[in-house]
Every structure is written in C-alpha cells, then in structure tokens.
C-alpha cells in the first residue's frame, strides 16, 4: 500500500513540492512557529490522522464525515456496487 502511495506521490511531485514549500514558509511565520515538513516524511503518511498539521488548523477536518475510516469504506463499497450494476447492464446489452 505504501509503495503504491509513494509512486502516486512521485507522479505529482511538483505540485506537492510547491505546496510543501508554501506550507513551510507559512509555518515559520506563525507565532509560535508550527512544525515544518520535509519531503522524506511525506510518502510515509497513509492516513489523514498521520498529518499533524491538520490538527492545528482552525477547522479540524478529521471530524468531517468523509474523514472517518468507516464512512470511507462504505463509500468504496457503494461505488463498487454501483459500478457492478452498470457492468451488468452493459453485459446484458452486449
């Protein structure tokens, strides 16, 4: 799983690198300064709760319904069922 995530991150390297630089600049300017991130730690983050920076924001997105592991799993299952129904219809046409 981590390998897959690391490969996906590498394909989006430039955008993530730009966002990381912007975050680090903003983190240093805060009073007190927030912890900065370095690129070597990013591929090891696999879940939302791994990002310490999300806890210090004015809105805690970890409490959003889409951030809960059970809800994400249910959405995956819902999407699989939806695609399976579409596949059945497509197979019946062919």
Image (spheres, rainbow, N blue to C red):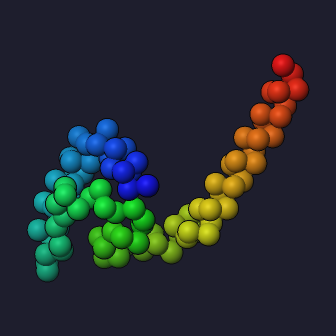
Q: Look at the image and tell me in which quarter the N terminus lies.
A: bottom left
Instruction: Say above or below: 16 vs 86.
Output: below
Residue 24 rendering spot, x and y as whole percentages: 16, 61
Q: Quadrant of residue 41?
A: bottom left
In this rendering, position of residue 55 left or right of residue 13? right
Q: Is residue 93 above or below residue 35?
A: above
Q: Nearer the viewer, residue 53 or 79?
A: 79
Figure quadrant of the C terminus: top right
Question: Is residue 27 rendered to the left or right of residue 16?
Answer: left
Residue at 36% in and 70% down: 50
Residue drawn at point x = 33 percent, y = 50 percent:
6
Furthest toward the right, the residue is 92
User: Where does the image place residue 80, in percent across and percent down from the top left?
Assistant: 70, 47
Query: Is residue 48 visible in this depiction of the protein?
Result: yes
Image location (x, y in percent) of residue 39: 19, 55
Query: Outermost residue toward the top?
Result: 94
**Quadrant in the rendering for residue 56:** bottom left
Provide residue 70's location: percent of width, then percent of height: 62, 69
Residue at the image position 69 percent from the left and 55 percent from the top: 77
Relative to 54, 70 lies left or right: right
- Looking at the image, which residue sits at the far bottom? 32
Q: Is residue 54 visible?
A: no
Residue at position x 11%, y 68% in the image? 28
Left or right position of 31 against 71: left
Tally of numbered discs: 0
């Amino acid at each position: 799983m981590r390998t897959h995530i690391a490969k996906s991150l590498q394909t989006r390297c430039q955008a993530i690198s730009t966002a990381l630089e912007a975050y680090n600049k903003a983190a240093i300017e805060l009073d007190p300064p927030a912890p900065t991130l370095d690129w070597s730690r990013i591929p090891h983050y696999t879940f939302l709760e791994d990002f310490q920076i999300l806890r210090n924001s004015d809105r805690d997105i970890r409490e959003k319904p889409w951030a809960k592991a059970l809800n994400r799993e249910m959405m995956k299952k819902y999407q699989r069922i939806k695609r399976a129904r579409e596949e059945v219809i497509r197979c019946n046409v062919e």
